[in-house]
Amino acid sequence: MKLKNSFFYTLRENVKDEDSKSSNLLVRAGMIKKSSAGDYMILPLGYKTLNNITQIIREEMNATDCQELIMPALLPEEVYVASGRREGFGKSMFSLKDRFGKPFVLGPTHEELFAIAAQMKIRSYKDLPFSLYQIQTKYRDEPRPRFGLIRVREFIMKDAYTFDSDEAGLDIAYSKQFNAYKKIFDRLGLDYKIVRADTGVMGGLLSEEFQAVTDIGEDILVLCDNCDYASNIEVAGCVNTDEATTLETMKLECVETPNARTIEEVVDFLKQPASKFVKTLVYKVDDKVVACMVRGNREVNETKLRKLFNATEVELADADTVVKVTGAGVGFAGPIDIKCELIMDEEVSVMHNFITGANKTGYHYIGVNTTDFKADKIADIRNIQEGDTCPKCGGKIYFKHGIEVGNTFKLGTKYSNALGLEYLNAENQLKPVWMGSYGIGPARCMAAIAEQYADEDGLIWPINIAPYKAAVVLISVKDEVQTELANKIYDTFMKEGIDTLLDDRDERPGVKFKDMDLIGIPYRITVGKKAAEGIIEFKKRGSIEVEEVHVNDLLNKINEAIKG
């Protein structure tokens, strides 16, 4: 592409309404532009980069014999009702009615439609296995769109689905897709971790996430310093350490703690460490009110709580509900005589002589033991913390932050049972089809790469996804020798299949250099004062080294650099 008469612009200053490095750089580089919260235009340079990413995804999907198709984004609401997911998606699903009053939604994901499509083919076990995929736009009404392309309301997704006759077949299909994902993210050059995750609204037997490691990531990755244990914090199991049981049991005593509601305030008032406290938090789990006990320096894991009750929604109860079940103001809840179901974290079950709220405004109990109350359930309901014991090997846990760029699900027969996707086995019996689901967010990948590959000057795209592999910078558009040589290099590269950008704008050299750095082109060829001698400058993005190369050696030089 020649810049002089093309749609190309850059911004010199940081963008005020972008809250991440990647979104700021992508907007400044003229690759994306926000149209509203959570919605972005993908402009020519960004679209070219995105297409390079989707091409890698497409190649690896095709290599698994997965067939590509395209599904509609506008879907009858009834298909999500039939699968039982309409309620689960709730307000995050865009909904509308057509002119006849029939309810429709904008598809947030397409398991249901792929199951319906599969019904067209599947009659017997002889029709299995097979797999399908699409690269298509999805819609989710995010309550807080943020971080540019990372959390949006309209996004492109590659979603694939496998169909098998039994669990063993699903395991094989899952392994093929899983390995294809590793190849994709390796080719994209991402620094990523694979972690176990919550199946969430998707449901099924297993979920694993491919997480691009970056400080801006909203997900907390739980890793071990001694083994390969890796999990999303939502599902990371906790190991309990038994307290010494030689302690003499204290006498239960109710003490006044005026104006001390939070753990920090009570710690300060009673001069005891947070680890000696047990906080009782009141939740609404769907329509049920539940009190949860965790150690004072721990947090309730709402995903674990939701799964414990097989619930759809979990949220902290409002003040009126807290008062109703405790008889006290917010901040004084405790397990003794509380009027709702009581869940005790496993760690609390081995504690002795701890401190809790007294269900009386302005008071706490000291010397509390598990014999002083009765818990309805004892379960792991807390978040794991850094420094905790690894549940796999006993090593120490540490955290990283990640951006979820891909996920894989063993759906099992959830959607087949709901939608009647069945086949006749060899004994002529009807059996449900086993499904797998596999998603990648290409635009999220682009944002994650921008987060991982950048410096103070701008983006640094890996060679195989950069919008152009090389940029030829013409220093003086008024110099005929320079102009002729620059165009000759450009034409040669393009004929050789090296996607090249020619900066033939009438701009100062410094402006051109800054723009090429900002948009992240891997290699810059500068045609300047030594053009008459056939000498040009060759520079790799991110390096301070500038090398003089004769034009006769340039093609070999760029080819070696690209291969390297």
Image (cartoon, helix red, strand yellow):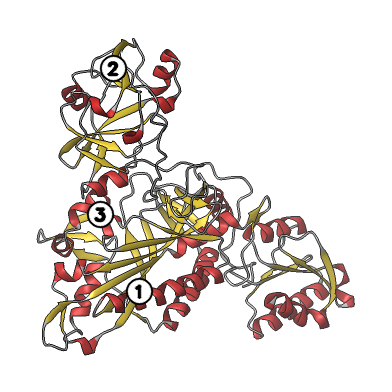
Residue at the (65%, 65%) spot, across then down: 521
Q: CA distance from mark 3 to mark 1?
A: 21 Å
Residue 181 in the image: above or below residue 41: below
Residue 89 in the image: above or below residue 254: below
Callout 3: helix, strand or loop? loop
Residue 94, label in figure: 3
Q: Residues within 10 Å of mark 3 (few under 14, many from 20)?
A: some
Percent x, y of residue 212: 51, 58
Percent x, y of residue 233: 41, 48
Residue 222, label in figure: none
Percent x, y of residue 481: 83, 75
Callout 2: helix, strand or loop? loop
Q: What residue is shown with label 2?
A: 252
Residue at the (12%, 80%) spot, across then down: 430
In primary-sequence order, the first of circles 2 and 1 is: 1
Quarter of the image for the C terminus: give it.
bottom right
Quarter-wise, where is residue 263 in the image?
top left
Does the rendering let one see residue 362? yes
- Kind of residue at disc 1: Gln
Q: CA distance from mark 2 to mark 3?
A: 53 Å
Q: Nearer the viewer, residue 53 or 103?
A: 53
Residue 387 in the image: above or below residue 115: above
Quarter-wise, where is residue 66 in the image?
bottom left
Q: CA distance from mark 2 to mark 1?
A: 63 Å
Q: Nearer the viewer, residue 204 or 190?
A: 204
- Kind of residue at disc 2: Leu
Q: Residues within 10 Å of mark 1 (few under 14, many from 20)?
A: many
Residue at the (21%, 59%) spot, across then down: 105
Q: What residue is shown with label 1?
A: 134
